[in-house]
Amino acid sequence: MKKSEKTELTVSKIMKTAITEFGTNGYVGSSLNNICKSGINKGLIYHNFRDKDALYLKFMEKSRKRFVSLIEESDCLSDLVKYMNVRMSFFREYPHEAHIFFEAVLQPQKHLWHEIKEILQPFYEINETVYRSVVSNVELRDGITENEAVEYFRLIQRMFNGYFSSQNMSLDEQVNKHETNLPKMLNFMLYGIARGGNEK
């Protein structure tokens, strides 16, 4: 076996174990020692990853790429309902990725904030693309521009995420409640809550 192939297999084994570790225990509760309990030599981890942070960020990047690829393949960027269904399907199929994804969005590690933000940027751009598509098909009130509507979306999104980041609940509960309530919140934001408004 070539050295490059052996290295690839080693990294794959480390990543597979790290997915379970980080996905089950979160960043704070995870350790390289726990990963080593699966039979991986700590020296091999440090040979391929600088430290726990590097492994965590690599895993997050891999998960984000998988998520973005699924969204692009699903061709759902112009359909909010379809987009939300694809999101929920992804998070149900890959629960460990969902846990880390939401931990990074709702409670990012402060010392990794810049790296996490950069990794998640394509995800945020997808959200904005979907919302711009929705807004472009809605008759906005007089005096409200599309850019203002999108800025309002960003504000609501930050407030919505902030609410969930402050709740004392498991990662499973965070994922399920966040994804279940987000479509409702977006519907309220777009069409209002008063009877007689523009209901969809």
Image (tube, helix red, strand yellow):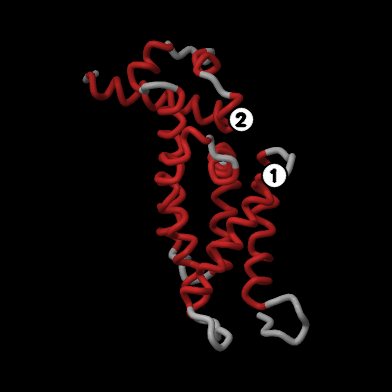
Q: Is residue 43 shown left or right of residue 1?
A: right
Residue closest to the eye, 16 or 107: 107
Residue furthest to the right in view is 195
Q: Which mark is residue 24?
A: 2
Q: Is residue 113 above or below residue 147?
A: above
**First in sequence: mark 2 vs mark 1:** 2
- Residue located beneath label 1 in the image: 166
Residue closest to the eye, 148 or 106: 148
For the residues labelled 2 and 1, the Cα–Cα distance comes to 20 Å
Which quadrant of the rendered structure holds the C terminus?
bottom right
Q: Which mark is residue 85?
A: none
**SS type, badge 1:** loop
Q: Residue at x 46, y 38 (%)?
A: 60
Number of residues whose C-alpha sits closer than 10 Å to that of mark 2, classed few (under 14), some (14–19) or many (20 or more): some
Residue closest to the eye, 32 or 105: 105
Q: Which amino acid type is marked by label 1?
A: Ser
Where does residue 175 sit, x and y in percent of width and height?
Answer: 64, 47
Where does residue 136 sit, x and y in percent of width and height?
Answer: 48, 79
Q: Quadrant of residue 55?
A: top left
Number of residues whose C-alpha sits closer than 10 Å to that of mark 1, classed few (under 14), some (14–19) or many (20 or more): few
Where does residue 15 sit, x and y in percent of width and height?
Answer: 44, 28
Q: Quadrant of residue 53?
A: top left
Where does residue 39 sit, x and y in percent of width and height?
Answer: 48, 12
Q: Is residue 9 shown left or right of residue 131?
A: left
